[in-house]
Amino acid sequence: MTFDRKAHWETVYREKSPSDVSWYQELPSASLEFIRSAQVSSDELIVDIGGGASRLVDCLTEEGYTNVTVLDISGQALACAKARLGVLAEQIDWCELDVTQYETSQPVSLWHDRALFHFLTEESDRNKYITALQQSLKVGGHLIIAGFAIGGPTRCSGLDTVQHDAMGLMGRLGPRFELLEEKHEAHLTPAKKKQEFSYFHFVRRSSD
């Protein structure tokens, strides 16, 4: 039987509140630090991949970013974020979609992904993700990607995960991308368990 990724995540957000999932952060400090360091203009397109019910969009709105897309496969997760933001939700582009199918005609200046890529355990899905990234992110654009560090959890939310390090990601992204910075974080879950995360900040240097 083929795994239904959308059905899985809709169930997760029907059965749990956003503050109960293991990846929940009241304040996404590391992500904000990297986004600020990228110094993209407030009107340039930022896409939060797998953003779901994350509070990152709240912070970006507060800091004056006006061109933000939140992409998630779960409509339930996006509904949670919309309800929390209230009228401010009208300023955000909400995209209910599997990232492997993402397309946009507007060049992306910053692609942010905290804890989605590590759920793509099939090589074909990882290749589709990279294709979507390469077709969307402009030259000079920034990629901020985070997930379980080597030695971190191998399962999350009932699913297997794949851990990545800098060398592995650089090999997958190829010479188009330059690694600017990496950071490790011990994330404390709502259940008070530590999960080792790695954050990587790349810039796209060329189109070929």
Image (cartoon, rainbow, N blue to C red):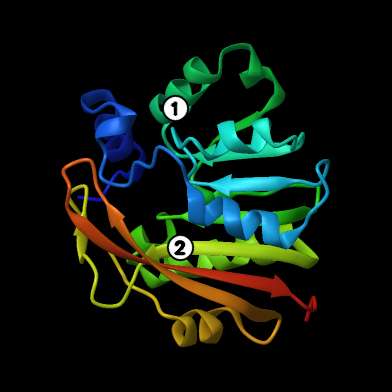
Q: Which mark is residue 35?
A: none
Which mark is first along the chain, 1 or 2? Answer: 1
* Vertical relation: 114 (above or below) 51: below
CA gap between label 2 and label 1 equals 22 Å
* Residue at horizontal 57 percent and vertical 31 percent from the top: 58
Amino acid type at mark 2: Ala
* Residue at horizontal 69 percent and vertical 61 percent from the top: 37
Q: Nearer the viewer, residue 148 or 50?
A: 148
* Vertical relation: 101 (above or below) 90: below
* Vertical relation: 178 (above or below) 194: below
Q: Position of residue 82 (x, y in %)?
A: 52, 20
Q: Nearer the viewer, residue 108 or 103?
A: 108
> Label 1 crowding class (10 Å Cα cut-off): few <14, some 14-19, many 20+?
some
Element at label 2: strand
Q: Position of residue 39 (x, y in %)?
A: 77, 57
**One can see residue 92 in this view:** yes
Which residue is under mark 2? 146
**One can see residue 160 in this view:** no
Q: Is residue 70 left or right of residue 164?
A: right
Element at label 1: helix
